[in-house]
Amino acid sequence: MKFADFYRQSIDTPEPFWRAEAELIDWSTPFSQVLDYSRPPFAKWFVGGCTNLCHNAVDRWVATQGEKAALIAISTETNSEKTYSFSELQREVERCAAIMLALGVGRGDRVLIYMPMIAEAAFAMLACARIGAIHSVVFGGFAANSLATRIDDAKPALIVSADGGARNGKAVPYKHLLDEAIALAEHQPAKVLLVDRGLAPMALVAGRDVDYATLRAAHMEARVPVTWLESNEASYILYTSGTTGKPKGVQRDVGGYAVALASSMKYNFCGNPGETFFATSDIGWVVGHSYIVYGPLIAGMATIMYEGLPIRPDAGVWWSIVEKYKVTRMFSAPTAIRVLRKQPPEFMRQYDLSSLKALYLAGEPLDETTSQWISSELNVPIIDNYWQTETGWPILSIAKGIDDQATRLGSPGVPMYGYKVKLLNENTGVECGANEKGVLVIDGPLPPGCMQTVYGDDARFVETYWSTFPEQQVYSTFDWGVRDADGYYFILGRTDDVINVAGHRLGTREIEESISSHANVSEVAVVGVEDKLKGQVAVAFAILKHAEQAATEAGRQALEREIMAVVDQQLGAVARPARVYFVAQLPKTRSGKLLRRSIQAICEGRSPGDLTAIEDPASLQQIQNALGA
């Protein structure tokens, strides 16, 4: 079948289309209705059907794949490797599930997971899915303030964490950050379950903190049956940055997500039982949920969890893993490939990469130079894909599992089945023609696997995602795009104040609030500036209360370091701006709105655009002078 025909079926006759796709997973109770869209924009998929993510990822493969590899946990930071078969993974997940039940966790309770990339993190996610608890994974090492806001929003009954992670050969302690976050939070979890890796000191809080190894030993023989969940019950919450400074809890369902992952593993990632999938992301991000933990296992594949850098102990480490475990499909980010491109090519060429059939890249736009380099080195298809935390699986890509449609440099591809993608003119809402820039939107209902709502805040879901074009029922991605005459899309950047740093989405408002908390900052603007390595970096322009502190170069540098340390402490190093510049005024409209796009344009050497509404043109000269200095 041609992809165009497959796509049209998904758009023109969605219910029979998704009824057929739902056969890719196991159901304990058949669904009575494919789609309930009686309360747009809220979509319910496979209504009345009961299933379980852990069953589909683990249990159903034990009979046929029981002794084959399921989870391969590799840490080049601690020089450890361990492979769990599907049977062994099932037992470990049951032990973790038994621990959670013994600690009082039940169906619908939230469990916050704040962990490094170790096997126990996957056990915890799958254990939650097994017993019907809702997990919320927070990127390991996130700053205490950021963690506290997520604790207060999710209100977890249990937090699962560790003494620490490791990066570049150095321990990254977690426990003091976790303790500080709990002290800052209003909500207090009943229990904290801790994995002691022996990496960092870890003082236990009596009555609250419990040791994973001790409880695991007490539940070695535990058998915990799966809890069958109605398709539309929540499976997890994953927080993503917003423009308001308050992170949004993306809430995902059970059945729709399982079907979307099973389907995308078949058509997008061409995965087969018994093969090995290697996604180089982290479970703190959506790629880690969809294509490290759930997707490959649902497809009956072995999945690799990797703790470490792509260039340590040397730049051949990923390729050594591909050779050793006969990786067939690999998923990474353009930033990582740009890092590897700077390394001597012999690190890649010394390994047998003949098992690898394709490399998938996502997280930020893939530039032509990087794509051509890695394609020539690996001699396999390089398949870009574009999606969001909110969608859970690709919006734009090339589905090689349906037909061998050509890729196009600079483009992530064409709309995937189920997604009715359009480009709308920002001002008129009229659909754009070929090569016309517009806002990329998706007609409702969103397909299976996409977010149900913002956790605990249906009104915010509607206001944030469905109100950009009030006359139309469309979901806004907040990304600019163009479509060429052949239907290939090209992503041009954000329409809102979220920036993309090496695949991490950061709200400029969050960074601004953090910088504003410094005692000498009266006002600040943060913009995302193009960066050849990371895609974008945050750059800040601050007005000082006491400008004399930055009157000398030494004073300016010291103050910049202080402000960066504040951001590190409150939001984590990932949010640290690349530079902080000091100015006397910021460009604003006469109504007081910051002209962030104009600031960004100046930083990138472009024209600042229409300035008819600017209050004081001299403020732009301030930006230029600061950059020149």
Image (tube, rainbow, N blue to C red):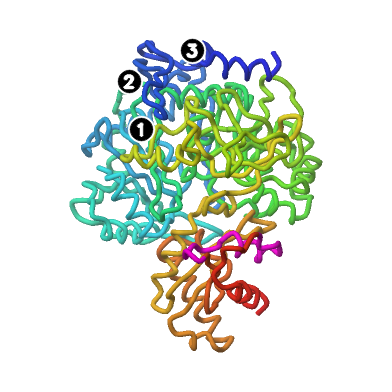
Label 2 and label 3: CA atoms lie apart by 19 Å
Instruction: Please tell me whether mark 2 or mark 3 is closer to you in this view.
Output: 3
- Residue 500 in the image: above or below residue 575: above
Find out whether residue 607 is within the magenta segment.
yes
Circles 3 and 1: CB atoms closer than 8 Å: no
Earlier-in-chain disc, 2 versus 3 = 3
The picture quadrant where one finds residue 121 is top left
Q: Amino acid at mark 3?
A: Arg
Q: Residues within 10 Å of mark 3 (few under 14, many from 20)?
A: some
The magenta region covers 590-609
Which sits in the foreground, 407 or 477?
Answer: 477
Q: Position of residue 67 (x, y in %)?
A: 50, 23
- Residue 436 in the image: above or below residue 194: above
Whether residue 511 appears in this view of the structure is: yes
Earlier-in-chain disc, 3 versus 1 = 3
Label 3 and label 1: CA atoms lie apart by 28 Å
Find out whether residue 504 is within the magenta segment.
no
Which sits in the foreground, 390 or 62?
Answer: 390
Residue 501 shown left or right of residue 249 in the figure: right
Earlier-in-chain disc, 1 versus 2 = 1
Residue bearing the label numbered 2:
228
Residue bearing the label numbered 3:
19
Mark 3 falls on what kind of element?
A: helix
